[in-house]
Amino acid sequence: MIYNYPMPFKCYPALAEYTQQYMEKYNSHWIYQVNVPIAGTLRSDLDKELASYGLGPAKMWLAFKRRGYFGERHVLNASPSLHVDYSQRTKELTHASIVFPVSGCKDTYQYWVEGNYTLVDADEIDPNGIRTTRQICKWNEPGTVVDEKAYISDTPTVVRTGIPHSVVSRDDGSYRTILSVRLKNNETFEEIVEKIQAKTD
């Protein structure tokens, strides 16, 4: 099983530049999760490219800006580091996300952990005072970090998000910023990869 797959987009440079500028004001806390208002031509261009892959439009554009070094962690009890992506509106797991690297992504990577776990709701208040609920993993026995790592530094990449995952951040204290695009139809990772291969092979 694979966990990530490159997904080229012509609009990537414009998306990265817009996200970088939008996130500049967030620079005091160790982590930010911000819904970026992608609209107008940029949104239209993104949705057109998604349609060219045979996919539905985007429904959410989340920027993650994080600093502070965190190595691979997979403790036995519930950990805020490892999580699965989850829709508060539909109460469903998000199967896949398209990660657009924005800045500070060199030498960082996403990783996954497999094993025996139970998903539990965790209520949190983000640095902006907004209460959110996400699904974290309560491990019934220690998990196993899979061999595959996703080094996403210069190419948009679709990743599995319905499996416990986290990110190893930079060790120099600088921010790592990415834009995570979730799809309206919540296509599975396998469906997306099949469509990428059909277009690019």
Image: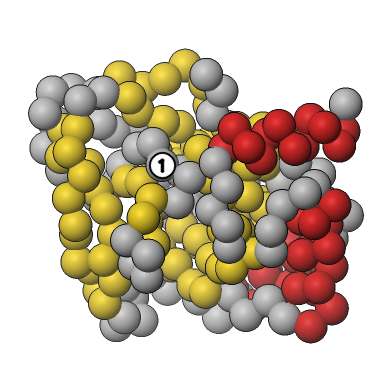
Q: Which residue lies at the image location 41% right of the left edge and 42% below the top edge?
A: 162
Q: Seen in the image, is 101 located left or right of residue 189?
A: right
Of residue 48 and residue 70, the one placed in the foreground of this image is 48
Quadrant for the C terminus in the image: top right
Q: Which residue lies at the image location 65% right of the left edge and 64% below the top edge?
A: 58
On screen, 171 above or below 100?
above
Of residue 157 and residue 107, the one placed in the foreground of this image is 157
Q: Which residue lies at the image location 26% right of the left edge and 66% below the top edge?
A: 133
For label 1, the residue is 162
Q: Which residue lies at the image location 26% right of the left edge and 77% below the top edge?
A: 131
Question: Can I make out residue 169 in this image?
Answer: no
Q: Quadrant of residue 40?
A: bottom right
Q: Position of residue 18 (x, y in %)?
A: 73, 73
Q: Position of residue 69 (x, y in %)?
A: 40, 44
Question: Can I make out residue 161 in this image?
Answer: yes
Q: Seen in the image, is 127 located left or right of residue 123?
A: right
Q: What element carries label 1?
A: loop
Q: Kindly identify the amino acid type of the residue bearing the numbered disc 1.
A: Gly
On screen, 102 above or below 77?
below
On screen, 58 above or below 52?
below
Q: Position of residue 82 (x, y in %)?
A: 31, 42
Q: Seen in the image, is 125 located left or right of residue 110?
A: left
Q: Seen in the image, is 32 located left or right of residue 133?
A: right
